[in-house]
Amino acid sequence: MVALNHYLVLSAILFSIGTAGVFMRRNLITILLSIEIMLNAVNLTFVAFGRALGSADGQIIVFFVMTVAAAEAAVGLAIVIGLFRHKESLNPDSFASLKW
Amino acid sequence: MNDTAFYLFGAIAIGASLLVIAQRNPIYSVLLLIASFGALSGLYVLLDAPFVAVIQIIVYAGAIMVLFLFVVMLLNAPHEDTDFDERVHPLLRPGPMKLGAALALGLAAELGWALSRGGDTGAFSDAKVDSVAAIGRSLFTDYAFPFEVTSILILVAMVGAVVLARREDPR
């Protein structure tokens, strides 16, 4: 019988994959995608806990997390476009200087 | 039946997420992440949260990921330009990357250890909230203020994205 713990373990695995992606990839787009994986892992935790406690609050917080994720993706991608115009590169190591 | 579906969707979510960070071409990464979100949506259905399952598909896979795909195709930079050999195992790469990989492994081990200590498996009760009406009522009464603040957040993000992505000298 699948219970709360199974969902928490799955969520922990997904969150770790997202963390590994942020640290190991050298591409701004892939780093943003890894952050989305981490946000979704947390969403899964919220919904699983909401189900276990018999409350709607978990699903409502997921709604807010999705809103923030949409705002973050819009602003983050705008910054990526701006950076790409300057350096013609998506490697975060090439944006090490504060001023150009 | 439900257990089989959980393991199936969980395997798809983990496999697709692993491939997202293993791919070198960002377009494949975005498409695999959409597959992962589809599997997560199935998990939400199993958790009796149809509202979340549907907005996961419509908002996340439909809007946010399409925005990512649009930017990837707009920038047209399919390959990562790194100053080291991509074929080297991540744990053998130089400097901070090795440290980051070790840190992620440490996080996974720590989360697994913490979760294995609980004796109670947390079996689900019968008190489930699966009606969209209940969620909407709660959203517009108890959470009315955060809901309104969200609209300001969206507005600020919209203005910020327009300003940041604008050309330097608009003639």
Image (spheres, helix red, strand yellow):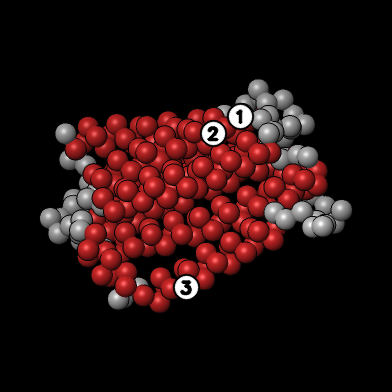
Q: Which mark identifies residue B25? A: 1
Q: Amino acid at mark 2?
A: Ser
Cα distance, mark 2 to mark 3? 32 Å
**CB within 8 Å, label 1 to label 2:** yes
Q: Are marks 1 and 2 on the same chain?
A: yes
Name the front one of labels 2 and 3. 3
Lateral position of residue A57 relative to residue B75, left or right? left
Cα distance, mark 3 to mark 1? 37 Å
Residue positioned 69% across, 33% down in the render: B77
Q: What x and y, as percent, mark residue A21?
A: 56, 40
> Which one is in front, B138 or B92?
B138
Dot 1, crowdedness within 10 Å: few (<14), some or many (≥20)? Answer: some
Q: What x and y, as percent, mark residue B123?
A: 18, 50
Circle 3 is placed at which residue position? Answer: B149
Q: Is residue A45 above or below residue A93?
A: below
> Which one is in front, B146 or A35?
B146
How many labels, in total?
Answer: 3
Residue positioned 66% across, 30% down in the render: B78
Lateral position of residue A76 relative to residue A97, left or right? left
